[in-house]
Image (spheres, rainbow, N blue to C red):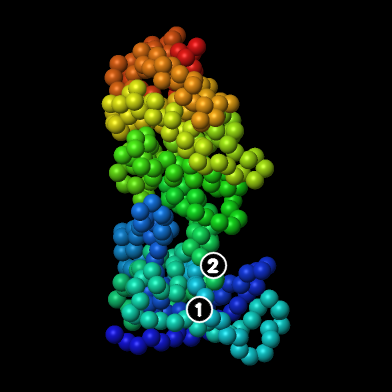
Amino acid sequence: MADPYEIRLPALRIRQGQQYIYTFGVDGKQIHDFTTVSRAHRHDIELQGYQRPEVLSHIRSIRRYLESDGAMLPNAIVLAFDDRVKFEPVGSRSVVEYVAAGELVIPVDESLSDDEKPAWLVDGQQRSAAIRDADLAEFAVAAVGFIAHGEAEQRSQFILVNNTKPLPKGLIHELLPDTKGHLPAAYAKKQLPARVLTRLNFGQRPKGEPFAGRIATPTMAGGYIKDNSVLKMIENSLYDGALYQYRDPEDGSGDLDQMVLHLNYFWTVVQVTFPEAWDLPPTKSRLTHGAGIQALGYVMDALTDGTTALELPKLGIERKIEALAEYCAWTSGSWNFGGDEPRRWNGIQNTPNDVKLMTSHLLRALR
């Protein structure tokens, strides 16, 4: 194995507010010598990494293009460096004060594991993989780098860089709880609900937490309840329901412990009342379907709004949810919404109209 060495690359340092970015060219064949592709995964319940899995078919198509005549990749890859990477200015000052010419000095040590390398690939994963695999001696690419202070900042940059791309919503939901820094308003609004969802999903299943391990996310492949269904239920309650009492509307923070306690109490009642329907996937149960999760979320708000988590046992929720059983067709039979013909149990779809229809039906039954 070769001794550690340095790669020195001509670069421009560009000041953006209080931050610096570095633009440079680099041989794509060298990128993986000092860069790790940090994919989303979990160690115990702590989220580590943030990249989508490589799409092999896309990589193969890029590789075929690269091996053809006249291939060109004009879009820059984006790298997050740690503080082992240095910029050394050279020459005289630029005619504009926000740009400086110099060299980017990147240490390379082949003995390091991937998670110990000094750079992370924020954008350009598939392009870099295609270059790595292509039958080419070298292929230079444009790159933009920045010094990141911890993985939370890398996650934030990853979300912002991919903001205009069709990034999978499930991946966004997993990244948001541990992301710091400025986020677009739509993502910032979902950050607190996403934190609650993560706490629910990674609770202790032996203790009976109803959602533990059941919410499908990129790192919880065994889950069967759609993360977006649970996220909508939490978000509805946070902004206009029972969970609002735990939220600070000024800064968007909230008491996560009390929110999780509140949700776990109510949904444990649901789980105990409808155990078979709760253990089935949405294709076989409308309870774990988006419509059921959201509709019962509104039932939770109607029954528990204004009551703290510690006071919930006094409300007799168990009796009220049990009384709903005769009005529900979670896994068989038909829904009798009144007026129109009865709807088959699986005729309910995850649409705003059907969610509203089921919600109204259940709230009428409560009364």
Check disc 1 and give the amino acid type: Val
Most foreground residue, 96 or 122: 122
Q: Can the viewer see residue 60 in this picture? A: yes
Foreground residue among 330 and 321: 321
Q: Is residue 324 visible?
A: no
Pointer 1 residue: 85
Q: Residue at x 49, y 26 (%)?
A: 312
198 shown above or below 23: above
- Give whichever of discs 1 and 2 has the lower sequence position: 1
Task: Bin the neighbour count of mark 1 within 10 Å (Cα to Cα): few under 14, some 14-19, many 20 and up.
Answer: some
Instruction: Tell which tag, 1 or 2, sits nearer the viewer.
Output: 2
Could you tell me residue 53's position as x and y percent? 35, 57
> Can you say whether 168 is above or below 67 in the image?
above
**What x and y, as percent, mark residue 284?**
29, 28
Q: Quadrant of residue 249?
A: top right
Q: Residue furthest bottom?
A: 91
Assign a secondary structure to mark 2: loop
Amino acid type of the residue that numbered disc 2 sits on in the rendered structure: His
Q: Residue furthest top?
A: 339
In this rendering, position of residue 7 left or right of residue 307: left
Residue closest to the eye, 25 or 183:
183
Q: Mark 2 = which residue? A: 149
Q: Secondary structure at mark 1?
A: loop
**Above or below: residue 59 compared with residue 253:** below
How many labels, in total? 2
Residue 212 image point, x, y percent: 36, 40
Residue drawn at x 39%, y 45% is 202
Rendered-image quadrant of the N terminus: bottom left
